Amino acid sequence: MLDDPLLHAPARPHVPDDHPHGPRRGPVSAQLRRHRAGPVVVGEWSVYYGRPCRFLDTAAGLCTIHATERQPQICRTYNPYTCWYKRAFGGESDEFVWVDREALDRIGEQVAFDEHRTIVEVPSWEDLLASAAPPPVASAAAVSRAVPLTLGPTRLRSDAPAEPQPHSYDDLRHPCDDCGAYCCTRLVFPKPRPATNVELDFWRLCLGFPGVEVGIGGDAWSLIVETTCRHLDAGGRCSVYGSPERPLRCSYYDEWKCAYKPRFGGGDTGFLRMGLDEFDAFLADLTFDAAGRVL
């Protein structure tokens, strides 16, 4: 289970300004499959990605790269005696509330807004606990029954960019017509650029999960999680288009300024995407000082 250190943000998950899936009443993850959100008693929200690590033997529940150089350092030094996962996923803690889409709707009915759409009243912690969703399945065997995710093509820095094709003004009027619905099939979490070997090690941990990439554009880094909006139909269209169910951020999204299509469909020569293997090759080219800072 990939959790809060990279997908964690105060109040609610951070979403790019131009992301169409901005929530109406809560975290964007509630709109997407295999994701849940949850506040803790101190008022912070986190997003949880429910997929098994690629190195997990799901039948035995054991790490297949344990005590090898491939195992991230953060896994080697993790203290099981202070583990929070078992308490939260086993439903033993009243300090955390699981929120799926249905629970979010229940909570939303208890939230009050002013005329500027600013939250002015929220339910008590006891009311949140009463509205909570059940904890996700903790069994590795049960999780392994989920359909595996696949990644799109990864473009390395050494790849030659595609030759740009000329288009007329009218050709560009409807960019969504030939799009792969990239904004509806992945979440993008902007993150600070890692500056140490410890921070880079955690990115290696994240990339061990299926459907996860790192995106780099200039000095900006992003954690990219492949998933699918529950409202996307088999034809790649929004099944709630034009209805009140559609998030406002989707309704008012300016497709002419979309960054998803050039980044994930090709054309953005300044954006690099890497999976775990490419990231390990990338790390081999870096140098560090004695304190582990990237030079």
Image (cartoon, grey):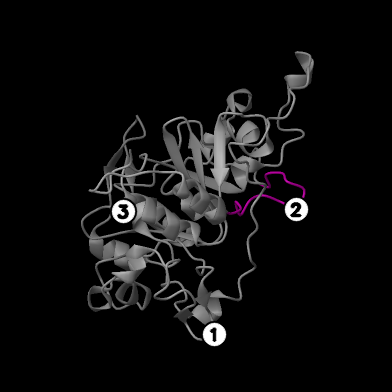
Determine the residue positioned at 54% across, 85% down. 59
Foreground label between 2 and 1: 1
Would you place residue 172 above or below residue 5 in this image? above
Q: Which quadrant holds the C terminus?
A: top left
Q: Could you tell which of marks 3 and 1 lies nearer the N-terminus?
A: 1
Would you place residue 290 above or below residue 1 in this image? above
**Residue that label 2 marks:** 234
Residue 265 or residue 205, whichever sits in front: 205
Foreground label between 3 and 1: 3
What residue type is disc 2 on?
A: Ala
**Residue that label 3 marks:** 198
* Residue 114 in which image quadrant: top left
Q: Could you tell which of marks 2 and 1 lies nearer the N-terminus?
A: 1
What residue type is disc 1 on?
A: Ala
* Residue 163 in which image quadrant: top right
**Which mark is on residue 59?**
1
Determine the residue positioned at 74% across, 22% down. 164
Quick one: SS at disc 3?
helix
Q: Could you tell which of marks 3 and 2 lies nearer the N-terminus?
A: 3
Spatial CA distance of label 3 from label 1 is 30 Å
Quick one: SS at disc 2?
loop
What residue type is disc 3 on?
A: Val
Q: Which residues are magenta?
A: 227-239
Magenta segment includes 134: no
Asked whether the beta carbons under mark 3 and mark 2 sit within 8 Å of each other, the answer is no
